[in-house]
């Protein structure tokens, strides 16, 4: 793959099958269900504070990123949060993840976000290489 083969764009309803397949690869704790996915997708696509990106290589979605910008009190304005970022197993180490994150950062800057953050245990060397640093411990309580 060359850089010319990669297109990062907003996801569309037509990407649903490919993004759902990737979401199933992403999930560790939860198992995505198609009915819930089909309900959430149009809501996310319409949400001005959400950005769902698709990484398309030769006409096929090979990765996606879902993130949000929201207001805070402590950071004197909005911050950006990457909720999900996934590149298909056969497409990793080709610059797709980097391109998704850079496009999200560009969008977050346009929304005047003070920073971009995410919770992940995967690929710390990837995030360090992009200038991210470990910042906090992540706590979670599953409600359903």
Image (tube, rainbow, N blue to C red):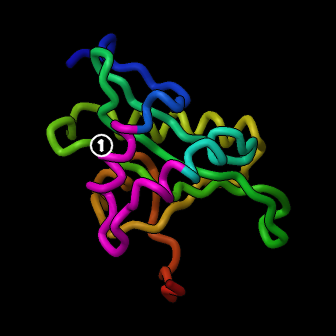
Image coordinates of residue 14 in percent, x first then y, are 47, 27
Q: Main SS of the magenta segment? A: helix
Q: Which residue is mark 1?
A: 87
| Above or below 83: residue 47 | above
Classify residue 120 by image quadrant. bottom left
Residue 30 falls inside the magenta stretch:
yes
Q: Quadrant of the N terminus?
A: top left
Query: Looking at the image, which is closer to me, 52 or 93?
Result: 52
Q: Residue at x 41, y 20 (%)?
A: 7
Residue at 60% x, 57% y is: 81
| Farthest residue, direction left | 90
Q: In the picture provided, is 89 more to the left or to the right than 106?
A: left
**Residue 129 part of the magenta-drawn span:** no
Badge 1 crowding class, 10 Å Cα cut-off, few under 14, some 14 to 19, many 20 or more, is: many
Is residue 50 positioned above or below 13 on the image? below
* Residue at image point 21% right, 40% down: 92
Residue located 50% across and 84% down the image = 144
Task: Pick the residue in front: 105 or 13.
Answer: 13
Q: Is residue 128 visible?
A: yes
Residue 136 picture location, percent across and down: 52, 78
Image coordinates of residue 35 in percent, x first then y, are 47, 56
Between 133 and 120, the one nearer to me in the picture = 120
The span shown in magenta is: 17-38
Q: Quick check: 30 above or below 12?
A: below
């Amino acid at each position: 793959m060359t850089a010319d083969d990669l297109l990062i764009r907003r996801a569309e309803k037509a990407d649903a099958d490919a993004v759902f397949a990737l979401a199933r690869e992403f999930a560790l704790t939860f198992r995505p269900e198609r009915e819930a996915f089909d309900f959430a997708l149009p809501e996310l696509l319409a949400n001005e504070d959400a950005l769902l990106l698709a990484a398309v290589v030769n006409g096929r979605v090979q990765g996606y990123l879902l993130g949000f910008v929201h207001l805070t009190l402590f950071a004197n304005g909005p911050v950006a949060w990457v909720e999900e970022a996934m590149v298909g197993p056969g497409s990793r180490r080709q610059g797709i993840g980097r391109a998704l994150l850079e496009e999200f950062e560009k969008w977050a800057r346009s929304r005047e976000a003070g920073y971009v953050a995410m919770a992940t245990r995967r690929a710390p060397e990837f995030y360090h290489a992009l200038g991210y640093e470990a910042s906090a411990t992540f706590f979670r309580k599953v409600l359903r």
